[in-house]
């Protein structure tokens, strides 16, 4: 009997490591041909994500449940996967007014790995367990492990430890039958195929993972009342651009002009939801806040009595 394949042999069998027939002559192509080919390959990513939608929706419901219960979404990743997760986590507070500790990322190699490669970090299984322990991951949390190959040791070990601590787990991989899928309550496999630049999973695989992260957080926040219709009514107007956006959101939601929206925002102390409920119910800031408190901050049911 032959010996089992080592890690390098296993990696070579993955579709994310395979050579793409369309790019065999990449170095001889014109710049236009290179970017046209990349664009053509990228056009397949959305279809690959679409095939995983049932699992993505199931995962988003797990995330929503954790956030509703006072838990967290904890991303876990190495390299490009971890950096993409960090980007998504960083956008949640300004977009949805979440606490910065409500959506976090455990990145192999720590914060330094955001801007530079940390050699050996993705193989640090003991470090993954330590990071999960240090974050005090528990039963109210949902941990999402992202790995394009589906075999990154840091991610597999981190999900293993998260399950031991009682957390719900989700995996996101870009190969079918991924190793990491066995360690997840919900396994998302988005098979994006060989990259234009062989093995460079920052390309199609990275795009797919970013799309999945977008779906998980956005759908979970919608489920938790962070939007009114298609408007991000929980955003924080922390600069002039966002203040202008908040005025436009209030104006659109309440069907008033920008001047009226601005006055309502001022009376509401900059709280977009309060301003909207004020305008749509005809009440003051205190009554609008009371309505929102009664509905756990969700705008639509706070308006039910005046429909």
Image: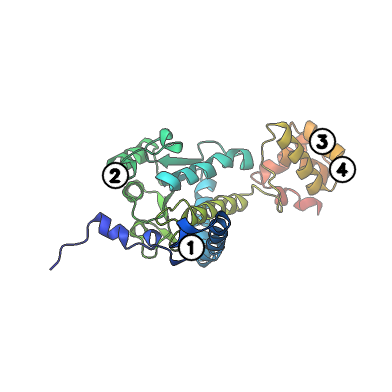
In the displayed structure image, the side of residue 46 where residue 241 appears, left or right = right
Q: CA distance from mark 4 to mark 2?
A: 56 Å
Q: Nearer the viewer, mark 2 or mark 3?
A: 2
Q: Circle 3 sits on which residue?
A: 262
Q: Circle 1 sits on which residue?
A: 55
Label 1: few (<14), some or many (≥20) within 10 Å? some
Residue in view at x 82 percent, y 35 percent = 262
Q: Earlier in the sequence, mark 4 or mark 3?
A: 4
Q: Circle 2 sits on which residue?
A: 125
Disc 1 + disc 4, Cβ < 8 Å: no
Label 2: few (<14), some or many (≥20) within 10 Å? many
Q: CA distance from mark 2 to mark 3?
A: 52 Å
Where disc 1 sits, the SS reads: helix
Question: Which quarter of the rendered picture does the C terminus lie within?
Answer: bottom right
In the displayed structure image, the side of residue 120 where residue 28 appears, left or right = right
Q: Circle 4 sits on which residue?
A: 257
Q: CA distance from mark 1 to mark 4?
A: 42 Å
Where disc 3 sits, the SS reads: helix
Q: Earlier in the sequence, mark 2 or mark 3?
A: 2
């Amino acid at each position: 009997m032959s010996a089992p394949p080592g890690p390098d042999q296993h990696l070579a069998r993955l579709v994310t490591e395979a050579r793409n027939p369309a790019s065999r002559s990449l170095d001889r192509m014109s710049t236009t041909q290179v970017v046209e080919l990349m664009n053509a390959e990228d056009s397949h990513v959305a279809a690959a994500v679409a095939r995983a939608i049932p699992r993505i929706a199931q995962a988003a419901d797990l995330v929503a449940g954790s956030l509703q219960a006072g838990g967290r979404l904890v991303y876990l990743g190495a390299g490009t996967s971890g950096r993409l997760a960090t980007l998504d986590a960083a956008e949640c507070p300004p977009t949805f007014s979440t606490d910065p500790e409500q959506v976090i990322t455990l990145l192999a190699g720590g914060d330094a790995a955001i801007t530079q490669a940390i050699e050996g970090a993705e193989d640090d299984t003991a470090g993954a367990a330590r990071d999960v322990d240090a974050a005090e991951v528990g039963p109210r949390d949902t941990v999402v492990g992202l790995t394009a190959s589906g075999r990154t040791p840091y991610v597999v070990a981190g999900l293993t430890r998260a399950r031991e601590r009682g957390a719900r787990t989700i995996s996101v991989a870009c190969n079918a039958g991924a190793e990491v899928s066995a360690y997840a309550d919900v396994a998302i496999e988005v098979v994006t195929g060989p990259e234009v630049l062989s093995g460079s999973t920052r390309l199609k695989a990275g795009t797919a993972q970013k799309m999945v992260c977008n779906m998980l957080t956005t759908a979970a926040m919608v489920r938790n009342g962070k939007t009114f219709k298609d408007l991000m009514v929980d955003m924080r107007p922390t600069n002039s651009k966002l203040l202008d956006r908040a005025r436009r959101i209030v104006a659109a939601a309440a069907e008033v002009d920008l001047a009226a929206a601005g006055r309502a925002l001022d009376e509401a102390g900059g709280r977009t939801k309060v301003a909207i409920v004020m305008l749509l119910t005809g009440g003051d800031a205190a009554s609008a806040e009371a309505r929102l408190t009664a509905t756990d901050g969700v705008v639509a049911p706070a308006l039910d009595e005046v429909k």
